[in-house]
Amino acid sequence: MAKIIGITGGIASGKSVVTDFLRSQGYQVIDADQVVHELQTKGGKLYQALISWLGSAILNEAGELDRPKLSQLIFSSQENLAKSSQLQNDIIRQELTNRRDQLAKTEETFFMDIPLLFEQDYADWFDEVWLVYVNPETQIKRLKARNGYSQEEAQQRLASQMKLEDKVPYADFVIKNDGNLEELIEQIDKKLRRLRNDESNGL
């Protein structure tokens, strides 16, 4: 039976660096954000659902979703944020279920990167949950640098998610990402060695 490990964190916590390293070590990673992106492409299930809700104003000239405009609309009010979650969650969960079940047939151990893992009740899918942790000041700094957000916009994005410190008690393993890349990789590498050791001992 496959061992499935959930990866979670928060916006600008560095999950993509972690999952890139896991892939470089030969592990398969299902990326929930990528799955959502695919479902939102022209003609996809989420594409259709979002147009039914918000209309064609969220499309660009090519008829594809205008992601910045969509993001702005969704985050413009708590009501829209709640409606967006309700609308998209069932479709996303079904697609993630399908991909999880497919990989479980071929992989001994694989990972699923789900940003809202705790918020959307995915925790019971996993044998272990790994949390990528950074302090809020680092998140805001990275968001402003990466996305060009103002202080207010960055804080708004953070406020829409469960605080990372509140996720720590629910995680099996906390990856601290306030330091440099070398320190980050060292933590993951150490954990993977233990994982392989457990596998070789049949645990």
Image (tube, grey):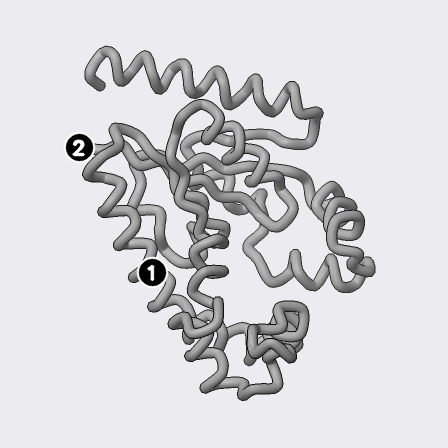
How many numbered marks are there?
2
Q: Which mark is residue 76?
A: none
Residue reaching furthest right?
A: 150
Nearer-the-camera pick, 108 or 115: 108
Measured along the vertical axis of the image, is residue 108 above or below residue 56?
above
Can residue 77 be seen here? The reply is no
Q: Is residue 69 left or right of residue 161?
A: right
**Quadrant that contains the C terminus:** top left
Q: Could you say whether the residue bearing mark 1 is in a helix, strand or loop?
A: helix
Q: Residue at x 43, y 72 (%)?
A: 46
What residue did someone put label 1 on? 93
Tell me which label, 1 or 2, sits earlier in the chain: 2
Q: Is residue 125 left or right of residue 150?
A: left
For the residue marked with disc 1, what is the amino acid? Arg
Residue 200 % position (x, y): 25, 12
Q: Residue at x 78, y 46 (%)?
A: 141
Nearer-the-camera pick, 126 or 30: 30
Give the Cα distance between marks 1 and 2. Answer: 21 Å
What residue did someone put label 2 on? 1
Q: Residue at x 49, y 26 (%)?
A: 24
Measured along the vertical axis of the image, is residue 31 above or below residue 63?
above
Can residue 188 be seen here? The reply is yes
